[in-house]
Amino acid sequence: MDLGVLRRWWPVASVTVLLAGAAFAAGHSSLGASRIPPASDTIPYVPDYPSAEPAASIPVEPRNGAEATQARIPPWILDAALVLLGLAVLLALGYLVWTLVTGALRRTTRALPVARARRTAEGTAREVVAALDAGLVELDDRSTDPRTAVIACWVRLEETAQEAGVPRLAGDTPTDLVGRLLRGDAEAGVPAIASADVLDGFAHVYREARYATHAVDERMRDQARAALRRLRGELATLATGPAAGVPS
């Protein structure tokens, strides 16, 4: 059974059980003493033995007195129990209605399409240029491992593609995702900013750094840096502002 269903309905079930227990207890509880049966109209024969002293009279409780000794539940207790039962029923019904309404609202909200603002080529180019600049700075740091630096640069481009709204399709390779970022995706509202083949050099270096078992040397670092600079030079015609300057 789904745990979400249990968490949603256990308060209603608990209140129902409590109400049933309270009703059962109210119907079978009794605080009164048993009633004394009335005296029989037929008086048994008692032989009259002579005695020096008269027999002491035996007190008999009157019938009305026996009825008066029966304990009764005060009316205010019954009224309070009915009020509590009514409140419990109202709370259970209120919780049930609240659960149904909030569930319907969540389903409706999830079903509503999210309008995505259409991006401009200039804005997308600036974001990609910023990612390229960060990658070039990392590649220029000779203290970092070349394999790690190349992979980090490509992952940064993937993150930029996702932030730009490029959807990741089933069966996509990392090259496909970044390629759609450059070529554009009309359905996602992402404009084209560069030709995808300009990334071929860096994509080759990335695949070798990611999947090859041999060591990644400084030569591959230089190839990755040259490919990123070539891509950045093509995007610089679109990007504006401080991000357009080529880092030294």
Image: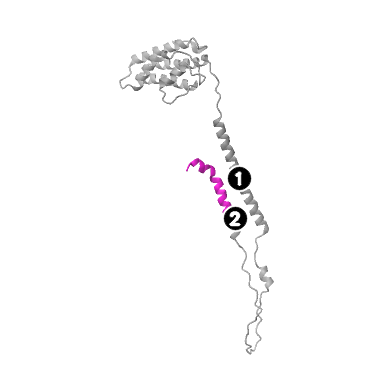
Q: What element carries label 1?
A: helix
Q: In which quarter of the image is the C terminus?
A: top left
The residue carrying pointer 2 sits among few (fewer than 14), some (14 to 19) or many (20 or more) residues within 10 Å by Cα, namely some
Residue closest to the eye, 19 or 240: 19
Q: Where is residue 152 in the image (x, y as percent from the top left)?
A: 41, 21
From the viewer's perspective, is residue 55 above or below residue 133?
below
Tell whether 33 sits left or right of 207.
Answer: right
Mark positioned earlier in the residue sequence (1 or 2): 2
The residue carrying pointer 1 sits among few (fewer than 14), some (14 to 19) or many (20 or more) residues within 10 Å by Cα, namely some
Can residue 105 be seen here? The reply is yes
Q: Does the magenta stretch include residue 2?
A: yes
Q: Give the range drawn in magenta.
A: 1-24
Question: Which residue corresponds to mark 2?
Answer: 23
Q: Position of residue 197 (x, y in %)?
A: 41, 13
Residue type highlighted by circle 2:
Ala
Residue closest to the eye, 78 or 187: 187
Gap between marks 1 and 2 measured at Cα:
18 Å
> Mark on residue 93?
1
